[in-house]
Amino acid sequence: MLDNETRQFAKRLIVAFCSLIFITLIIFILIIPSIEYIGRPAFLDVLVTPLDSVVQINGEIYSNGVYEFEPGIYFANISKDGFESKTIEIELEKNKTTSLYIYLEQNDGGWEYYQERYNEQSLDALLKINGYGKPVLEPTDHDDSGSNFIHTMSIQLYTPIYFSICGEPASRMNCDSISVDYGHNKQCGNKPCLIITGRRKEINQETLAEVGAELEQRGFSLNDYEYVYMQDADR
């Protein structure tokens, strides 16, 4: 039989062993899952327009840019006086970049703000968020209310476009002066219409390709518009 001292020692040993097991379980349950996030944050790419909108994420103020967060669920509120506010729920995952691409519409449903002279950068951001740029972006909340504005009003800020196509570029010989303007023509019906003007009697594929390239540089696609060609021999 064990003496009293030996039994006490055995009890302490059993208690210590059980405590070790308990602590180990706590480590696996609470600490280990957290360790996998160390050095592996989530990223949030923020692009909001108007550019001076107030962006709050879980109550903290942010501006346009890329930020690191711990993975989890967040709530973003975007607001500006005179515009309809938006609140977006976003889930950020480790090692992944999530986008927060949001634009605000005026309270009256208009878009005049984006057409004002000193708000060109906000307009550029609006175009990017709606897929007019590289890489192609899209609104996080899938809001397409700005599409009609972009296809009509915004292109007016980038037209007319003028350029020349020369048969002999080095000597600037045999050149055709081309202009592209947004307008209305019965041949286009109710679709967005581009008026292309040049010296030649008919537009050729080379000129049409150049028109497409000029539009693409400004974030637009010729495929989104009907076009009418008009000759102006006096150019």
Image (cartoon, rainbow, N blue to C red):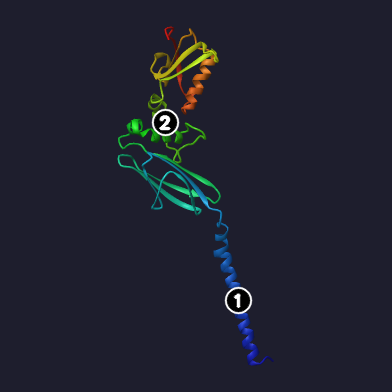
- Left or right relative to 110: residue 36: right
Q: Which of 40 and 27 is in front in this view?
A: 40
Going 51% across and 23% down the picture, which residue do you hit?
213
Tally the marks.
2
147 to 75, vertically: above or below: above
Q: Which amino acid type is shown beneath numbered disc 2?
A: Ser
Q: Which of 173 and 231 is in front in this view?
A: 173
Q: Residue furthest front?
A: 171
151 to 37, vertically: above or below: above
175 to 137, vertically: above or below: above
Q: Where is residue 58 in the image (x, y as percent from the top left)?
A: 41, 52
Q: Where is residue 52 in the image (x, y as percent from the top left)?
A: 36, 41
Q: Where is residue 60 in the image (x, y as percent from the top left)?
A: 39, 52
Going 39% across and 14% down the picture, which residue do you hit?
186
**Disc marking residue 18:** 1
Q: In which quarter of the image is residue 8?
A: bottom right
* Quadrant in the picture for the N terminus: bottom right
* Quadrant in the picture for the C terminus: top left
- Left or right relative to 228: residue 112: left
Badge 2 crowding class, 10 Å Cα cut-off, few under 14, some 14 to 19, many 20 or more, is few
Which element is circle 1 on? Answer: helix
Which element is circle 2 on? Answer: helix
Q: Earlier in the sequence, mark 1 or mark 2?
A: 1
Going 38% across and 32% down the picture, which residue do you hit?
120
Q: Which amino acid type is shown beneath numbered disc 1?
A: Cys
Q: Quadrant of residue 80?
A: top left
What whole-number distance in Å separates the C-alpha atoms at marks 1 and 2?
Answer: 66 Å
Q: Name the residue under label 2.
A: 147
Q: Quadrant of residue 79?
A: top left
Mark 1 against mark 2, which lies toward the viewer? 2
Q: Where is residue 13 in the image (x, y as percent from the top left)?
A: 63, 81
